[in-house]
Amino acid sequence: MEIIYAGATHYGAGAYRSLQKFFDRIYLIKDNPQDVLEIKRDCDVVIDDFDSVECKYVFLGGYAKLITADQLTQKVYINVHGAILPRWRGMHTTFWSIMNGDKELGVTFHLVNEYMDDGDIIAQFKFEYHGQPVSEVNEEIDTIIENNAGRLCSEYIAGKIQPVPQDKTQAMFGARRNYDDCLIDFTMSNDMLKRYFTALTRPYPLPMLLIRGEKYEVLDHKIIARDYYGPTGRAVNVDNEGVWIKTSEGFLVIKNVQKLGNDMKEKLSDIIPLGYRFRH
């Protein structure tokens, strides 16, 4: 039993360990992450690209590059996606799931076709989401992949699994996010702000403020409901709790921040004056 493996992201090494239990030889694309290459077995072989060997099957463990139509004519590609398909295709799916109030998160193993996360489903695993931080979500996803990737690939290759087409009418798409997307939108409802601060936790960038062209991560916060018409996005009060910033449904109170890329904690009240208008 042989397979080609190309991984990335946080579950790359776990997927490789899972494949090792079921495949006699694994061909590793040379740009696999270092933690994958460090656990390479003597029987496994590092190759330049997918076409370097005749092996028919490829497993993608978070591989970021799109597979071309020509590549799809040469080999069968199996992908693992850290979300429940077809609901969340694309990038940064855990963030979009949390922001949309999903009560379940999960993992999908599926075949690859010419469209993004569109191929037939081999297997899915779901778990309850009840507000746990993203680091715990990642651990759950890692565990599912390590426990199942090798078995599912070997069973599919052996003809024991019949893939199921996705219901494309249920598809939604998560866009790639960057630092600008982490800037707080003070027009959000309190419920959406709570989701936002839950979805943006370590090991990823935290929610941010833009202050005089510089981005600052928010280290603590309190959301207060007090619905009245006022200047949304303005620092309207400063006291021992921090800076009170008017939101659409009350206040976001922030005491400590740190400049992006700098681990020094600063008081927000020392950086901005009362009345400062935040933009995003």
Image (cartoon, grey):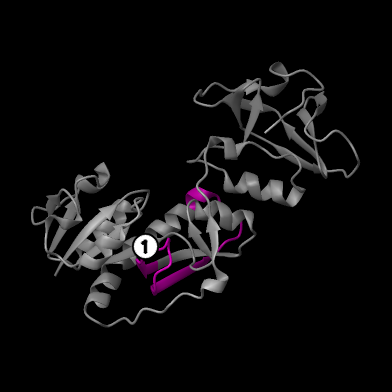
Q: Secondary structure at mark 1?
A: strand
Label 1 crowding class (10 Å Cα cut-off): few <14, some 14-19, many 20+? many
Question: Residue 107: x, y in percent?
Answer: 44, 64
205 part of magenta stretch: no
Above or below 245: residue 273: above
User: Which is more toward the observer, 151 or 182?
Assistant: 182
The quadrant of the picture occupied by the C terminus is: top right
Question: Residue 24: x, y in percent?
Answer: 12, 65
Question: Residue 185: x, y in percent?
Answer: 70, 40
Above or below 134: residue 23: below
The quadrant of the picture occupied by the N terminus is: bottom left
State whether residue 136 appears in this view.
Answer: yes
Quarter residue 228 falls in: top right
* Residue visible at 20% across and 60% down in the picture: 4
Above or below 198: residue 208: above
* Residue visible at 46% across and 74% down in the picture: 166
Q: Which residues are magenta?
A: 109-136
Question: Residue 189: x, y in percent?
Answer: 76, 48
Residue ID for mark 1: 80
- Residue farthest along the left direction in this orientation: 43
Quarter residue 139 falls in: bottom left
* Residue visible at 18% across and 53% down in the picture: 28
- Residue farthest along the front direction in this orientation: 70
Above or below 272: residue 73: below
State whether residue 18 appears in this view.
Answer: no
